[in-house]
Amino acid sequence: MNITVKINTVKSIEELEGSWSNDDFTELLKRFDYEDSAKLKPGELKEYLFMAISDFEPNEAAVILLSYKLPETFSAGQIDNLSHEMLREKISENYSDIYIHKFLFEINQLLYKAYNGKFPLTKANLVEFELKMENEEETELTKELGLKALSKSLSDNCLLNRLFNEQLESDDSFPEAEGIIWNLQKKGNFQYAITASEKWFSKDDFEKTEYECTIIPSLENSEPK
């Protein structure tokens, strides 16, 4: 598949838009023992949640958020261990299961802001780009294809290329792309946006902003449906 790519912007971001809704804040206020959330205006919910969280020890707050966001992922013992580890290291980058990194990032950032930096600061990258195929038709971009396209712009030394070079350069199955890319937006007119942890690449890793390349879809995604 021959394509042309133009990288428009690479931004470092500290939170993902839409990670938490007002319904989430309302429910979490109850779990943090604030009973009057129904009396609050929507714009006040987050502020009051931060105040409610600060009444708890940091690891206790982490337990509540992990139990709420990932109720079926961890055992009680695992949640307790993670609640302490989150204070010392970037769990959303280091946890073995990359498919839940996004959720761990969302939890970490809420705690980071509630406790004014007691938790590690983790960041993500928002990459906005234009992608066209040779025939100029709008591309049905998947996370796998988007990641393969962006990898052609990145240095060989970035973790993404070092760890997944074989999958990026072949038709091998690449399910990890679903965990690496947290959000893929299709904006129309050949414009796309991808969000991923800075664990995989940084702004400085982009060596080209306009280029032509060939990407190879995995066999499982290129077979006729």
Image: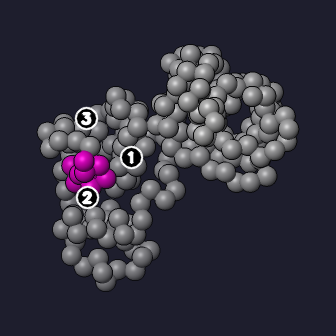
Q: Secondary structure at mark 1?
A: helix
- Category of crowding for the residue at label 3, using alpha-carbon neighbours closer than 10 angstroms: few (below 14), some (14–19), many (at least 20): some
Q: CA distance from mark 3 to mark 2?
A: 18 Å
On screen, residue 78 above or below 148: below
Q: Quadrant of the C terminus?
A: top right
Task: Give the mark, 1 or 2, whose residue is nearer the N terminus.
Answer: 2
Q: Which residue is mark 2?
A: 54
Q: Quadrant of residue 88?
A: top left
Which mark is drawn over residue 85?
Answer: 3
Give amino acid for label 3: Glu
Q: Which residue is located at x 49 percent, y 59 percent?
A: 18
Region rendered in magenta: 63-72
Can residue 75 be seen here?
yes
Q: Nearer the viewer, mark 3 or mark 1?
A: 1
Task: Give the mark, 3 or 1, whose residue is nearer the N terminus.
Answer: 3
- Category of crowding for the residue at label 1, using alpha-carbon neighbours closer than 10 angstroms: few (below 14), some (14–19), many (at least 20): some
Q: Residue furthest front?
A: 225
